[in-house]
Image (cartoon, rainbow, N blue to C red):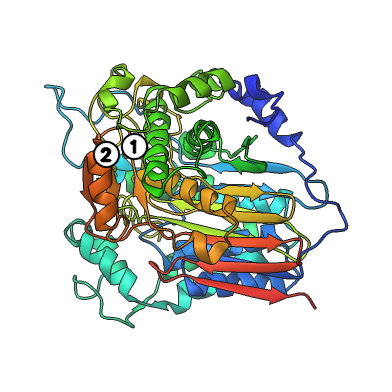
Amino acid sequence: MRMPFPNQSLQRGKPGALLLCALLFYVPILPAADAPPAAAIASAHPLATRAGLETLERGGNAFDAAVTVSAALAVVEPYSSGIGGGGFWLLHRAVDGKQVMVDGREKAPGAAYKRMYLDDKDNVRESASLEGPLAAGIPGLIAGLAHLAEHYGRLPLSQSLEPAVRLAREGFPVNQGYRDMVGWRLKSLQKFPDTARLFLAGNGVPEPGHPIIQEDLGNLLEQVGLKGAGYFYQGPFAKLLVDGVRAGGGIWSLEDLQNYSVVERAPIVTEYRGIRVVSAPPPSSGGIVLTQALEILEHQDLVGVDHITRMHVVIEAMRRAYRDRAVYLGDPDFVTIPTDRLLAPDYLEGLALTIDPKRATPSAELGDTPDLAQRGENTSHFSLIDAEGNRVAGTLSINLPFGAVFVPPGTGVLLNDEMDDFSIKANTPNAYGLVGDQANAVAGNKRPLSSMTPTFVESADRVGILGTPGGSRIISMVLLGVLDFAAGNGPESWVKVRRYHHQYLPDEVQFEPHGLVAYEQEELRKLGHSLKQASYSYGDMHAVMWDRKNNQVFAASDPRGEGKAALLPNK
């Protein structure tokens, strides 16, 4: 059932009250004397994990390390996250149990409007929301890092950013993952000379080991460390950004940058079979969709049924939760989200009762939505815990690989293309095949709906931290990871779970190669499911677990990616 959440009504369209709610949201979970025997970091790149360990070794806490890892990923994974993007950081502070999400999601420029990506015949303009500065929202990453350092860290921001400054200036060697992402967006990268000079070699895919040096980005990070987030959002550097964006056809203004701020939001909290699940609130769809799916499954027998029926029921729970995502969810500062109703026990029990264990429910039978693809490695996640028990689940993104593939000259800032996460046109899927309603329509200063789902799972004797990239599939991957936690398994298992997915529309079960074996495919088709195998493995989950009963810490990085998990034993 859903955990009591007395502030729920404050989560709907009242930013001032919401901020106060988040600041006062304390969840005492662990006795103050409890502490793990080691710190742990699992991130999408070995250099980012190493950078985070460096900050911990220098006396920083988990929140300082989160700044370091976020900034380092921005340097070494320009295809997944970056200073020109944003992110969500889910925090747990050990001393008082406070849990909160720092929302550093991008915002639409003030001049944005509903039809800005449509032509005069109401057709979507090709690539307008995917390439070039018109596709970019106002970045929130720098504001998020400064907020973490000021309100939760113990080190100066400059010290936490030092490893990223060094990586930008000295460069990092190209690996196969980098080459794959460049290959996927090579033609787009080649359209913009300033971008191509930074991230290509001879205007083509760099060879393995080729150094990617970002001098302008290193200078920017150094100045932000010395002068704070204001260096990025106001003054000469902000003007350089805006001038470059507008010269390239974008609509940013200095006021857009000056007015950007992060928001602290109360997480979505639920209980599933004795396990507390803490996850991201809107403008992430992750927490609500994850909660709905879990509470639907709470009403199902997942132990006493056969393997195929269990898989079928999980798929049907995904279908129903993603349907509500399409209809109701958006930026809570702009639209009224019926959170109470969406998470009401009677409503979710009713959804559970509509599941037929012997037959797939066609999505059309769930009712029409009002007016309302897919690689997903273009986001990054890290999980970490420090020796005090502070923990962070951070998910960062610039949307498609290399974002908008546009760098305003002289800035080193690769812009996001998160504007595509809005509902550009009724009944028109975005780059991840997701449809949406008016709740997620384009509007000035609005945050686009996200699927990023940084999550904590907490039982009497274990604490888990997890998340992943993967576009629309993020929530279903986290769901499968939470179910694996509930089955008693650890992070090494969560990150390896075979992945399948249903997002309501298109009405099909998507799965990675080997995600469903031949027998499972055959049996699911007999139940009426339409299946579609992806041509690649997806997701890049990074997870940490503290086993309080045996006082051990475990960390794991997804074998599908090139990340690194590491422990730092207490001294």
Report the residue at 35% width, 45% height from top: 501
Q: Residues within 10 Å of mark 1 (few under 14, many from 20)?
A: many
Which residue is the extreme one toward the left?
A: 121
Front one among 423 and 186:
423
Name the amino acid, label 2: Gly
Q: Is residue 415 visible?
A: no
Mark identifier at residue 503: 1
Q: Quadrant of residue 465?
A: bottom right
* Extreme-right residue of the structure: 33
In the rendered view, does 368 fall on the left or right side of 349?
A: left
Residue 148 place in picture, x, y as percent: 66, 51
**Which of the marked residues, 2 or 1, is nearer the chain's N terminus?**
2
* Residue marked by disc 2: 433
Determine the CA span between mark 2 and mark 1.
9 Å
Relative to 90, is 227 above or below?
below
Q: In which quarter of the image is residue 328?
A: top left
Q: Residue at x 73, y 74 (%)?
A: 58
Q: Position of residue 101 (x, y in %)?
A: 62, 42
Q: Is residue 293 above or below residue 62?
A: above
Residue 195: image location, x then y, percent: 28, 61
Name the element at disc 1: loop
Q: Which of marks 2 and 1 is in front?
A: 1
Nearest the viewer among 492 and 369 is: 492
49 sits left or right of 193 in the view = right
Task: Locate the N terminus and report the quarter of the image it occupies.
Answer: top right
Image quadrant in which the C terminus is located: bottom right
Q: Which residue is drawn at 69% across and 49% down?
A: 459
Which amino acid lies under the numbered mark 1 shown in the image of this protein? Gln
Q: Residues within 10 Å of mark 2 (few under 14, many from 20)?
A: some
